[in-house]
Image (cartoon, grey):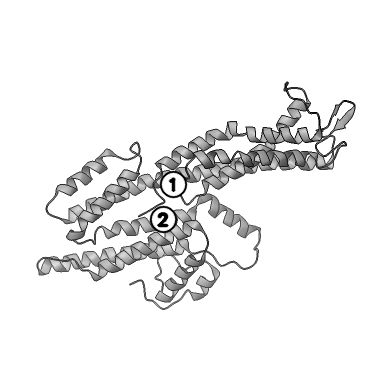
Amino acid sequence: MFGRKKDKSRSTVNEGPLAPDGEDLSEQTIAQLECRVCADPSIWRALAFASYAKVRDELTRLVAHQGITGNQAQLATQADGRKSVVASAEQTLREALQAMAPERRRGLGGPRRWWRMLKLFYSGTRIEQAWLAIHRARGALYLLYPPAELPAQIESLQNLLDDLPESSTPRSLGATLGRLKTRTTVTPETTAELREIYEQAIAVSDVLQHEARILRNTLMTASAAIFTVVLALGLAHALDTQIVELCLRHGGNELCPLGGSLHPFDVFTVELAGMLGGLLSVVIPLATGERIKTPYRVFNQQLVLKMLAGAASALAGVILVESELISGFQFTSASAILGYAIVFGFAQQLVTGAIDRRANSLAKQTPSAKDV
């Protein structure tokens, strides 16, 4: 069913990028790509490949089932139209497979390769290309369904619309779908309308997925900025302990995070204690929040941000207490310094809690994965 040209891209497949755009893939190349996708542990590829396989098998079934009726002229016209739709669906499935296929990795690679991988991860290019192609192929199937199967497809579309947030879904979609349910005759316009409803519903789902990616990228950027600051302060203190001094005198004794004397790793110790407090705060969104049903791992970035924000808030809190800018706290031992660092690290929840609420709201609106 897929292109059967001579395999010109075997060496390319072994290296990573695939056949040039618009070039057909041989059945052997397609099988190799499918094996590579199945062998990859990425969750988003597993979900995308499941939808890809579902559309591929459905297309194969519909190609075998002609579903053409009418006189000789109508038969010829419908056959030509079906061939065009099938060819388009097959091409988009090939594009989806190429976008899903992971690149072959030989060694660690250089800075240019790592920079390219970071850009792909940040932009979500592969994910967006794969799902866009799968959705286009799925939309083409509506033009191939025989009349007897359209009621089931209408119900499937209704379920998709029900999963979308009402505030983002045009009311006209539900009204149009309701009119299609009452029709007793099926025309080419009916299948075209079903395809249009599907594409508009998927567009709403894609917007929610874009928002999830933006949220993930924002968390990544914030985490990178905080990590740079806390690492720089820790290194600066390790090189010159007078830059950030976390020791104080109590009862004639000097109290420091690592004992009774100044140590180059005092700042790092407080930051690690704060990271522990930030890690403990993860229990709150884990117990009360909802996971965003998306290929973008937003919750993982929430975890990283909480840990790094905990390190920053712990260091800031200990400095403010020792400088007496915050009253009501008193360090009586080295353990007390670390204990307060953990408390300050947990307190970052006051700030990151707003992010948790945003993620929870987005999770409630997002449909179950990018199902087709």
Q: Position of residue 86 (x, y in %)?
A: 29, 65
Q: Which quadrant: the C terminus?
A: bottom left
Which is more toward the observer, 265 or 141? 265
Q: Which mark is residue 131?
A: 2
Vertical order, 132 against 14 (above or below): above
Q: Are marks 1 and 2 in contact (CB under 8 Å)?
A: yes
Q: CA distance from mark 1 to mark 2?
A: 11 Å
In-image side of 114 versus 71 (left or right): right
Residue at (53%, 36%) from the top-left corner? 355
In-image side of 202 versus 99 (left or right): left
Q: Position of residue 75 (x, y in %)?
A: 14, 68
Q: Position of residue 269 (x, y in %)?
A: 76, 41
Which is more toward the observer, 263 or 70? 263
Taking the view exactly as shown, the residue that stands out farthest to the bottom is: 6
Q: Tell me the element at label 1.
A: helix
Residue underneath mark 1: 209
Q: Position of residue 150 (x, y in %)?
A: 21, 56
